[in-house]
Amino acid sequence: MANNAQRTTQTASRVRRPRYRRKVCPFCMEGVKYIDYKNPDALRPYLDELGKIQGRRKTGVCAKHQRRLAVAIKRARHLALLPFAPEHLRGTELG
């Protein structure tokens, strides 16, 4: 009986966490070797509503392609293909 009581307390103390399916890098799946900075429509899904580059955990991009994606977004921003700041903050004084 003591063994059975121990077993119930051990399982009650364990917390089951939901298992999430690991995200697969969309660039690896398509076999992309070069992320084109001249295509802003392909880069927009990787920006949040404030214009910041989203992290790997949110987008599911691997480390290699995240670095290349960041460079492509920065190049597109420099050429004014993508905004540095969101529209609702442009032209307003901060502070």
Image: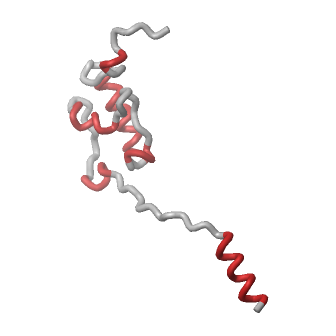
Q: Which residue is drawn at 34% across and 13% down?
A: 90
**How many numbered marks, from 0 up?**
0
Q: In this view, does 74 lie to the left or right of 31?
A: right
Relative to 64, residue 13 above or below: below
Question: Which residue is depicted at the point 36% across and 20% down?
Answer: 85
What is the quadrant of residue 7 in the picture? Answer: bottom right
Q: In this view, does 88 lie above or below 34?
A: above
The answer to which of 72 and 54 lies nearer the viewer is 54
Q: x and y percent of residue 80 in the render?
A: 26, 18
Question: Which of the colour schemes (rainbow, by chain, secondary structure, one colour) is used?
Answer: secondary structure
Q: Where is residue 82 in the image (x, y as percent from the top left)?
A: 28, 24
Q: Nearer the viewer, residue 37 or 54?
A: 54
Q: In this view, does 59 lie above or below 78?
A: below
Residue 72's x, y, as percent? 32, 32
Image vertical order of residue 86 relative to residue 56, above or below: above
Residue 45 in which image quadrant: top left
On screen, residue 42 versus residue 6, left or right, reads left
Residue most extreme to the right: 2
Image quarter (top left, top right, bottom left or bottom right) of the N terminus: bottom right
Quarter of the image for residue 17 reads bottom right
Q: Residue at x 74, y 82 (%)?
A: 6
Residue at horizontal 36%, vertical 38%?
68
Percent position of residue 55, x then y: 44, 40
Question: Would residue 43 appear left or right of 62 to someone viewing this image?
Answer: left
Classify residue 29 as left or right of residue 17: left
